Amino acid sequence: MINKKIIENVIEAALSTGGDFAEIFIEDKKGIGINMISGKTENIMSGRDYGIGIRIFKDFNSVYAYTNKSDESTLIQTAKKASKALLGENIISRSLINNMKIEQNHKIEIKPSEIPTKKKIEAMRRAYESAKGFDDIISQVTVNYQDYNQKIAVANSEGIYVEDERTRTRLAIGAVATRDGEMQSGSSSPGAQQGFEFIENLDLEWHGKEAARIAKTMVEADYSPSGKMPVIIHNGFGGVIFHEACGHGLEATSVAKNNSVFAEKIGEKVASDIVTAVDDGTIPNEWGSSNIDDEGNPTQKNILIENGVLKGYMIDKLNGRRMNMKATGSSRRQSYKYPPTSRMTNTFIASGKSNFDEIISSTEKGLFAKYMGGGSVNPATGEFNFAVMEGYLVENGKIIKPVRGATLIGKGINILKKIDMVGDNLSFGQGMCGSSSGSVPANVGQPTIRVSEITVGGRE
């Protein structure tokens, strides 16, 4: 994407004041976002984002600078300005840039850029009409469409030069149901690292109806009881609790600073024996996957917890230095405007041996959280508070009625130890994860699990 000789000169300038590592990140991203409200196309935004980020290390310190100009003089000037923040012995340490070839594991069949905007809007309208036509109680439907193609290149003073290309497509449907002045919402937001074939193979009507069904069910539901009780958390997006309450605490961003309850616990029991948790950025065409991370390392399958024992963390290069541990292909960033750090990709609790019916039938009394909503987490402690978007009471081994307004309150590391059943129906849900390096696509996932006791907030 930029001439190799220019890259070598920029790296040399970056190391001119004594830095011991320099990296260049190049990004060229093109995409479109379309918003539909009440059946009308409100906004169509398309554009291109291009720029270069330059990062320099000196021991455990780093500095980052970026520009959207790619001429050699600007890049060298930017590198020299950044290097002044890391003064040291003037020792140049770099290797000649060599191409590193990677295998493209995420096949794209239909480039979204080749599809007319009109066809994308037609797909959105199908989803809208299925949601709006589900029931007269549905008062509003919104549909958002996004696709983008991101080309990146990473080069560093250790001689690495590698390129990657990522194409992602997503459709998000939100429905609102209104009854007697009260409103409840439902949503469905599938996405993948695929081209427009993802939309063509998607059951648009099902996703529209599902968003509307959740909203209707919840607006007609009674309020949830409160107190401590067993909670069954369904598969797919139910994994957001592990992602938020535990996953962030397993990122080196937190661990290296000792701001995590999981710090210095490798080899220790941190969860129930039946819990194995994984972060895997290699799964073909999944929302959080890529061929390489944003430091140029191949993504990999990282076992975080195995049979309840903490096995590893998600580690980026800088925090790996601080922890004296190798990077794990987990470094990500929103764009060239952000320095990368350790982040989750596709993070999930692995399948267990119980089936869904068995989990329900063996629960005398509790809450079934079919779909999770938003929440808040303290990453340092793992304390969380999550809304249940769609919930049901379970009594005598049967799902008896829907309830709304339930929240799950607890501490991630405690919840891990109270998981007493893990299902065999692993699936994923798609979201955007925010952290110090910006917002990135992340998959959350799990099979249906049961936690023997969680504090449930409700109206009673």
Image (tube, rainbow, N blue to C red):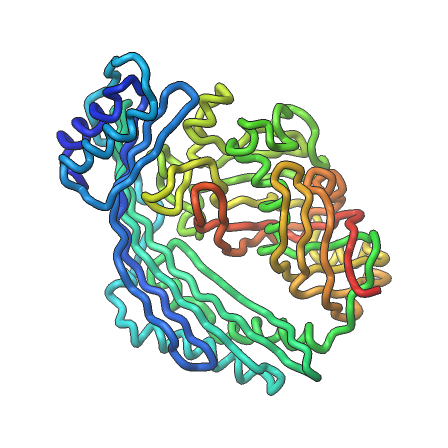
**Residue farthest bottom in this picture:** 136
Q: At 43% across and 78% down in the image, what residue appears? A: 126
- Could you tell me which quadrant the C terminus lies in? bottom right
- State whether residue 371 is above or below residue 58: below
Query: Image quarter for residue 21?
Result: top left
- State whether residue 374 is above or below residue 177: above
Q: Position of residue 459 (x, y in %)?
A: 80, 65
Q: At 31% across and 20% down in the image, what residue appears? A: 19
Q: Is residue 7 left or right of residue 352?
A: left
Q: Nearer the viewer, residue 255 or 114?
A: 255
Q: At 36% across and 75% down in the image, what residue appears? A: 121
Q: At 37% across and 42% down in the image, what residue appears? A: 338
Q: Is residue 266 visible?
A: no
Q: Position of residue 274 (x, y in %)?
A: 70, 39
- State whether residue 214 is above or below residue 61: below
- Could you tell me which quadrant the N terminus lies in? top left
Q: Position of residue 51 (x, y in %)?
A: 25, 45
Q: Is residue 355 left or right of residue 150?
A: right
Q: Nearer the viewer, residue 48 or 77?
A: 77
